[in-house]
């Protein structure tokens, strides 16, 4: 096993131990740090995540410029925010599958394809909701 993998495993064990037994603001602070690390890793390592962030940076301000009700604006923004959430989950699935083995396997392909399908459905939902509200 490479020292890099061993180091990653040691860090993961330490991170889990850091949260164990913690409560209140300390646990919240530590969990927030891990969440930020996940966002950073996704942004730096996943082109698809950067693309949905760009989509959010374009569509959320646009939602404020459109002549729609507050409820419609909230729906437009909420549905767009689903894209990075689903992409984070999709990337986590892909990373987990790759962590297990880089060998081609039908179950690995199935898991990755399902994650991709979830993102496709999310993008379709975004397009449909925006079309229904704006047209």
Image (cartoon, rainbow, N blue to C red):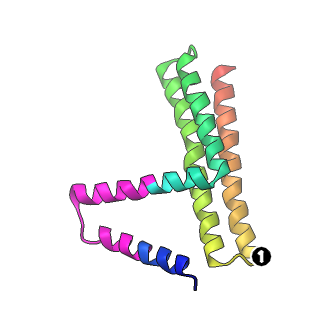
Outermost residue toward the front?
A: 3
Check if residue 32 falls in the magenta segment.
Answer: yes
Q: Is residue 3 above or below residue 16?
A: below
Q: Is residue 129 left or right of residue 73?
A: right
Q: Is residue 123 above or below residue 130?
A: below
Outermost residue toward the bottom?
A: 1
Q: Quadrant of residue 80?
A: top right
Which quarter shows the N terminus?
bottom right
User: Total number of numbered labels?
Assistant: 1
Which quarter shows the C terminus?
top right
Give the residues in magenta.
12-36
Q: Judge the density around disc 1: few (<14), some (14-19), many (≥20) Cα neighbours within 10 Å.
A: few
Name the residue beneath numbered marker 1. Answer: 104
Q: Residue at x 43, y 72 (%)?
A: 12
Q: Quadrant of residue 89?
A: bottom right
Q: Residue at x 67, y 78 (%)?
A: 101
Check if residue 33 falls in the magenta segment.
Answer: yes
Residue 87 rendering spot, x and y as whole percentages? 61, 51
Q: Residue at x 61, y 56 (%)?
A: 45
Residue 110 rendering spot, x and y as whole percentages? 73, 68
Residue 8 rendering spot, x and y as whole percentages? 49, 74
Q: Is residue 16 above or below residue 113?
A: below
Q: Residue at x 51, y 52 (%)?
A: 40
User: Please, what is the dominant secondary structure of the magenta stretch?
Assistant: helix
Residue 16 rendering spot, x and y as whole percentages? 37, 72
Secondary structure beneath dot 1 equals loop
Q: Quadrant of residue 94?
A: bottom right
| Residue 87 vs residue 114, the one in the foreground | 87
| Residue 122 vs residue 101, the one in the foreground | 101
């Amino acid at each position: 096993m490479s020292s890099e993998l061993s180091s990653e495993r040691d860090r993961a064990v330490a991170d889990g131990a850091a949260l164990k037994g913690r409560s209140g603001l300390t646990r919240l602070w530590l969990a927030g740090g891990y969440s930020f690390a996940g966002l950073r890793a996704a942004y730096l390592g996943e082109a698809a995540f950067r693309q949905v962030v760009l989509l959010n940076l374009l569509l959320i301000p646009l939602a404020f410029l459109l002549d729609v009700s507050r409820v419609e604006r909230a729906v437009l923004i909420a549905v767009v925010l689903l894209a990075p959430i689903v992409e984070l989950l999709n990337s986590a699935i892909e990373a987990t599958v790759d962590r297990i083995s880089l060998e081609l396997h039908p179950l690995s392909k199935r898991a990755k394809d399902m994650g991709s399908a979830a993102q496709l459905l999310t993008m379709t939902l975004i397009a449909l909701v925006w079309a229904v509200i704006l047209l």
